[in-house]
Image (cartoon, helix red, strand yellow):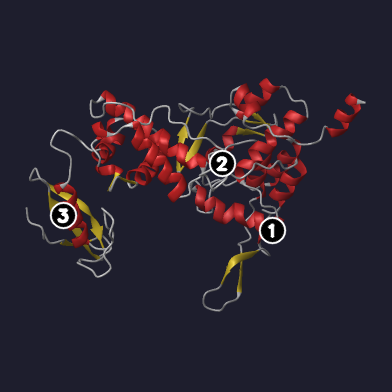
């Protein structure tokens, strides 16, 4: 095997020169170790098992992995992870979540080599113990993040057992306790905002308010303050705050799904990364009906509809919103203008908590949230502290 297979020079569509790290594996097949800006070998070599510094070091590291790889017939967890999404396809959002989690998990070192290089059949529960210890103690992950990685590994390992690549589910039944002393990053507490506060937050999306709201950054050339464009987003923010939609469902709403005469929304789907999926998914219900409050209806009636798209709340270009762009262009400016550090999911939690405190029937509340009664009351209901006088009166 040639230890110094040279990188291949290529040009991407923009005309920029790049270097492709191609190498020959033990079976004589040509494989790729990535594309790089530098040919190499460079001076500041990345010491990881999959360096990102230059193409030559990536080739050398690939040969090192080949030399210590599992015997033929014993596939590594990294090899299986590469083909798993195609073999067991899931929704685009689930696949993206799994991909992100697997990338983090497979890079974790176990006994001197990354998890990705371990033969799947050799993995045992003790390895999961070491993985979790690394996630909590070294990486400082929150419990929720560690649980997410565990869940993805468990789902994939069940499929690997079915394919006779793994022998046991080394992740199964591994519990990550919320009070584990190794957890340094605690989850943020959910805060409940009143409907008046939510309306006030939405008002910060008015065009005239945004026009005088200063951006966090200054003009790079002049150092002068920058302000947000005078685009009216009050109706969109009010729908997020007062109609109990998930953000993706707001992005996917069409004008035909709103009936201001009947004061009802009839959502049919959700959007993720600019693409709309109609209907319910395996884990979430998106189709249903949601009442429109009078104050929200008033704002919606004042909104000038876009006739170049069926979307109720399109981007300025008429396309479907991406969540990071929505945060940057719509939500953060409202946070700055209102002085309220409201997080998007807190609006949904506040909606349920306030209506539960108002005595709304739990079954109806679950129906409009498109959840089960148990989920709506257990996970989305928080104390509003409006019953203290009633408690004192009952006690006497």
Q: Which residue does the numbered mark 2 point to in the structure image?
A: 247
Instruction: Report which quarter residue 328 is drawn in.
Output: bottom right
The answer to whether residue 47 is seen in the rendering is yes
Q: Which residue does the numbered mark 3 point to in the structure image?
A: 22
How far across and down, in percent of the image, does residue 280 sit? Answer: 49, 27
Q: Mark 1 falls on what kind of element?
A: helix
Can you tell which of label 3 and label 1 is closer to the viewer? 3
Alpha-carbon neighbours of circle 3 within 10 Å: few (<14), some, or many (≥20)?
many
Residue drawn at (70%, 42%), measured in percent from left and top?
301
Task: Give the camera-side residue of 180 and 352.
Answer: 180
Residue 341 relative to residue 101: left or right: right
Residue drawn at (26%, 64%), measured in percent from left and top?
45
Residue that protrudes farthest toward the right in the picture? 396
**Distance in Å between CA atoms under marks 3 and 1:** 52 Å
Question: Which badge, 3 or 1, is on the more N-terminal residue?
Answer: 3
**Distance in Å between CA atoms under marks 2 and 3:** 42 Å
**Distance in Å between CA atoms under marks 1 and 2:** 21 Å
Residue 75 relative to residue 297: left or right: left
Q: Mark 3 falls on what kind of element?
A: strand
Instruction: Report which quarter residue 129 is drawn in.
Output: top left
On screen, residue 278 above or below 181: above
Question: Which badge, 2 or 3, is on the more N-terminal residue?
Answer: 3
How far across and down, in percent of the image, does residue 317 sit? Answer: 50, 53
Question: Which badge, 1 or 2, is on the more N-terminal residue?
Answer: 2
Quadrant (top left/top right/bottom left/bottom right) for the C terminus: top right
Residue 269 relative to residue 19: left or right: right
Task: Give the camera-side residue of 145 and 201.
Answer: 145
The answer to whether residue 292 is seen in the rendering is no
Instruction: Report which quarter residue 81 is drawn in.
Output: top left
Q: Which mark is residue 337?
A: 1
How far across and down, in percent of the image, does residue 237 sit? Answer: 64, 46
């Amino acid at each position: 095997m040639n230890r110094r297979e040279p990188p291949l020079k290529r040009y991407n569509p923009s005309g920029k020169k790049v270097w492709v790290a191609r190498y020959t594996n033990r079976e004589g097949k040509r494989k790729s170790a990535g594309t790089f800006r530098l040919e190499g070998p460079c001076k500041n070599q990345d010491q990881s098992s999959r360096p990102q510094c230059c193409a030559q070091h990536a080739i050398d590291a690939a040969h090192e992995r080949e030399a210590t790889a599992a015997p033929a017939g014993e596939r590594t967890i990294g090899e299986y992870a590469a083909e798993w999404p195609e073999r067991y396809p899931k929704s685009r959002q689930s696949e993206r979540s799994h991909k992100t989690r697997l990338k983090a998990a497979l890079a974790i070192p176990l006994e001197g080599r990354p998890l990705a290089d371990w033969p799947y059949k050799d993995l045992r529960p003790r390895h999961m113990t070491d993985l979790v210890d690394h996630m909590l103690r070294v990486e400082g992950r929150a419990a929720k993040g560690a649980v997410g990685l565990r869940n993805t590994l468990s789902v994939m390992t069940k499929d690997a057992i079915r394919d006779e690549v793994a022998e046991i589910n080394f992740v199964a039944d591994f519990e990550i306790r919320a009070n584990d002393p190794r957890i340094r990053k605690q989850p943020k507490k959910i805060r409940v905002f009143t409907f008046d506060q939510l309306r006030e937050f939405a008002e910060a999306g008015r065009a005239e308010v945004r026009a005088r709201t200063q951006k966090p950054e200054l003009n790079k050339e002049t150092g002068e303050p920058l302000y947000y464009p005078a685009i009216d987003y009050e109706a969109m923010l009010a729908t997020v705050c007062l109609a109990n939609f998930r953000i993706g469902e707001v992005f996917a709403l069409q004008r035909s799904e709103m009936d201001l005469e009947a004061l009802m929304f009839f959502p049919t789907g959700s959007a993720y990364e600019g693409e709309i999926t109609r209907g319910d998914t395996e884990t979430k219900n998106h189709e249903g009906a949601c009442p429109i409050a009078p104050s929200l209806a008033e704002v919606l009636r004042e909104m000038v509809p876009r006739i170049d798209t069926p979307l109720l709340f399109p981007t300025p270009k008429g396309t479907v919103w991406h969540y990071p762009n929505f945060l940057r262009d719509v939500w953060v400016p409202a946070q700055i203008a209102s002085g309220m550090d409201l997080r998007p999911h807190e609006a949904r939690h506040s909606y349920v908590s306030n209506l539960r405190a108002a005595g709304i029937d739990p079954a109806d509340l679950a129906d409009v949230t498109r959840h089960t009664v148990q989920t709506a009351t257990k996970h989305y209901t928080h104390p509003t502290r409006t019953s203290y006088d009633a408690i004192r009166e009952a006690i006497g």
